[in-house]
């Protein structure tokens, strides 16, 4: 059960409002099918394993003696991730309710959650993933429409999606596996890979719509109840993702406040602008750190045993 709960934290942090809306599935996975879901799941599992193997303080392990380097990069990545989340919240608020305050509302709930005890955050995130799958299955039973796909076939977009999103969830789960042995961490990473791929595959087969629409999932909901549940999940996804970004990037309440304020300002650029220009930057940053983490994890495993050997 402990393996599953940690895996759920990773997936619940990975899949925010952009995923639940169906928008990210349309952009990153609509043309790649099972292979794309498998690739994204594998990259996610391996990325999580690398950070878990680095222990409770992965930042110090990434660049020994130069902690400020990964810390600065992670702060930037977290701020960009938070900005994108607030921008999507703003777009959702405008489209659904014609209210320009979606980002502020997301911040108002995410900020206290980010400062809450780990158990509270864990509980909220663990509920999010099963709810996502259940709603997707409900929609699958009632919808026969097809994707309107611009281009098809397997491509590198699933890798880009996993690379862009793996850093913050991986950093989050590393804090919950500090007392796990190496074998335990491998089991967790395998579960993350399987469950991430499975949830993505379920969604790309259940949520239909046009690539260019912002909310293909709610727009195709079979009934009002499902639509309301989806909208609640959209809000929950925004909140859990934003809270994870704040927890990862901010060392204290002052930094958390400054990061939240800066992200709210940056969200004014608009979700379209952020998707086009910031998402590629976020992918490169996360992929670079994940590669470094993987190399450092291998070096650590090959080094002479220290106290970690007792956990194997």
Image: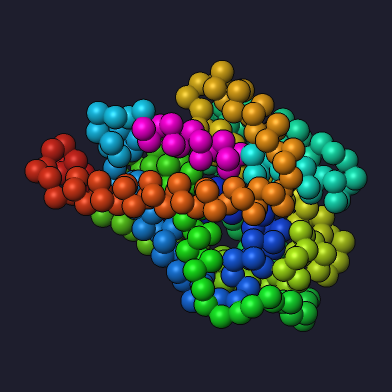
- Is 170 or 62 nearer to us in this picture? 62
Question: Which residue sits furthest right?
Answer: 98
Give residue 191's position: percent from left, percent from top. 41, 61
Q: Is residue 271 above or below residue 136?
A: above
Q: Is residue 48 above or below residue 137?
A: above
Taking 209 as reference, is 257 left or right?
Answer: left
Residue drawn at (52%, 77%) of the image: 154
- Is 181 or 52 nearer to us in this picture? 52
Residue drawn at (52%, 48%) of the image: 282
Principal secondary structure, stretch drawn in magenta: helix
Residue drawn at (64%, 78%) of the image: 151
Q: Is residue 80 magenta?
A: yes
Question: How does the figure colour the protein chain or chains?
Answer: rainbow
Give residue 45's position: percent from left, percent from top. 40, 59
Q: Is residue 204 above or below residue 160?
A: below
Taking 201 as reference, is 69 left or right?
Answer: left
Taking 7 as reference, is 107 left or right?
Answer: right
Question: Which residue sits furthest left?
Answer: 304
Region of the chain picked out in magenta, as a range: 69-82
Number of marks present in the image shown: 0
Give residue 87's position: percent from left, percent from top. 71, 43
Q: Is residue 305 magenta?
A: no
């Amino acid at each position: 059960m402990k393996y599953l709960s940690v895996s759920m934290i990773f997936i619940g942090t990975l899949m925010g409002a952009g995923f639940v809306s169906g928008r990210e599935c349309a952009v990153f996975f609509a043309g790649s099918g099972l292979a794309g879901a498998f690739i994204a799941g594998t990259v996610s599992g391996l990325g999580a394993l690398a950070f878990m193997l680095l222990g409770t303080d992965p930042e110090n392990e990434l660049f020994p003696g130069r902690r400020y380097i990964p810390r600065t990069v992670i702060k930037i990545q977290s701020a960009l991730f938070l900005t994108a989340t607030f921008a999507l919240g703003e777009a959702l608020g405008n489209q659904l309710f014609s209210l320009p305050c979606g980002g502020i509302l997301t911040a108002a709930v995410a900020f206290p959650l980010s400062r809450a005890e780990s158990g509270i955050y864990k509980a909220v995130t663990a509920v999010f993933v099963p709810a996502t799958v259940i709603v997707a299955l409900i929609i699958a039973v009632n919808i026969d429409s097809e994707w309107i796909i611009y281009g098809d076939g397997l491509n590198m977009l699933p890798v880009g999606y996993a690379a862009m999103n793996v850093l913050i969830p991986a950093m989050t789960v590393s804090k919950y596996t500090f007392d796990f042995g190496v074998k335990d961490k491998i089991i967790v990473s395998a579960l993350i890979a399987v469950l991430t791929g499975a949830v993505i595959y379920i969604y790309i087969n259940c949520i239909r719509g046009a690539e260019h629409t912002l909310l293909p999932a709610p727009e195709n909901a079979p009934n009002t109840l499902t639509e309301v549940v989806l909208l609640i999940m959209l809000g929950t996804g925004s909140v859990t993702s934003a809270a994870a970004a704040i927890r990862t990037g901010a060392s204290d309440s002052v930094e958390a406040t400054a990061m939240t304020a800066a992200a709210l300002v940056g969200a004014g650029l608009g979700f379209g602008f952020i998707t086009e220009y910031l998402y590629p930057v976020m992918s490169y940053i996360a992929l670079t750190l994940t590669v470094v983490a993987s190399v450092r994890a291998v070096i650590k495993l090959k080094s002479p045993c220290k106290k970690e050997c007792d956990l194997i």
